Image (cartoon, rainbow, N blue to C red):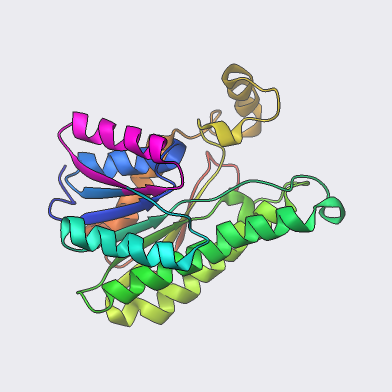
Amino acid sequence: MNRFTGKTALVTGAGTGLGRAIALAFAAEGASVVAAGRTESTLAETVRLIEAADGRAAAVTADVTDSGQLRKLVEAAVTRFGGLDIAVNNAGILRGNGPVGEVSEEDWDAVLRTNVTGVWLAMKHQIAHMKDNGGGAIVNVSSNLGAHVRVSGLGAYSTSKAAVATLTRIAALDHIHQGIRINAVSPGASDGPMSLRPGETETDRAERAKTETPLGRVAEADEIAAAVLYLSSPEAGAVVGTDLVVDSGSSA
């Protein structure tokens, strides 16, 4: 399929895990990809993988907590590939695990600043370009641990992802009249490193998922990426402000 030929897609947190899978998936369907993140070496590897498959990509280092860097990130996409059609706000952190009353203020602030304010700032600059250039599609990566499943000890992370889901819905209503479709995807546990518990191996996780998920396994990063591509595609032209859950049935 070549649903995104001639389009430019920006993916934050594209150096590893789900972000890399999303970037590779867009490139495989013809998009020029701007891979953004904080670590130059991992972004360079994402670009190498895309180019090895005859795709087009550029790496841009950016911290989503810095508005100026996010503005320059959008400018870099426009300069390099001529525009910005799709943005996936995937960058996020997981810190401050433990009972709510024991989470440090430093961890709380870091998680909310990155996972919520970072998404808001990114959208501000993406929308500023899209509204004057024919619209576009934005997908924010939330989590089933936000508005769908509650797990003890993840107060900061879960709060941040619930906020992303709500922010997405409000932004979608605010900007659909400008031709900008905004949606969220909420993954559950996947085959990436973030879903491993302390001391757990991938084999351990697979065994745990057999009993903890109705599907009997965690989602693959490529399956979550496919949901992101759907929300970004013409096939989802009437999908506005949704939160698409991909969590092996955990929140059913």
Q: Is residue 39 left or right of residue 249?
A: left
Residue found farthest to the top: 203
- In percent of width and height, residue 118 lies at 52, 62
Location of residue 108 by image quarter? bottom right
In the image, residue 60 sits, relative to residue 118, either above or below, namely above
State the residue in front, 35 or 7.
Answer: 35
State the residue in front, 55 or 38.
Answer: 38
In the image, residue 125 sits, relative to residue 249, either above or below, namely below
Query: How many numbered discs?
Result: 0
Query: Does the stretch in magenta take in 42?
Result: yes
Q: Is residue 50 left or right of residue 107?
A: left
Residue 147 in sight in this render: no
- Quarter of the image with the N terminus in it: top left
Q: Which residue occupies 64% across, 19% down?
A: 204
Q: Which residue occupies 25% across, 58% down?
A: 77
Q: Is residue 35 left or right of residue 8?
A: right
In the image, residue 182 sits, relative to residue 19, either above or below, namely below
- In percent of width and height, residue 137 lies at 31, 64
Q: Which residue occupies 37% across, 78% down?
A: 175
Q: Which residues are magenta?
A: 35-59
State the residue in front, 185 or 23.
Answer: 23
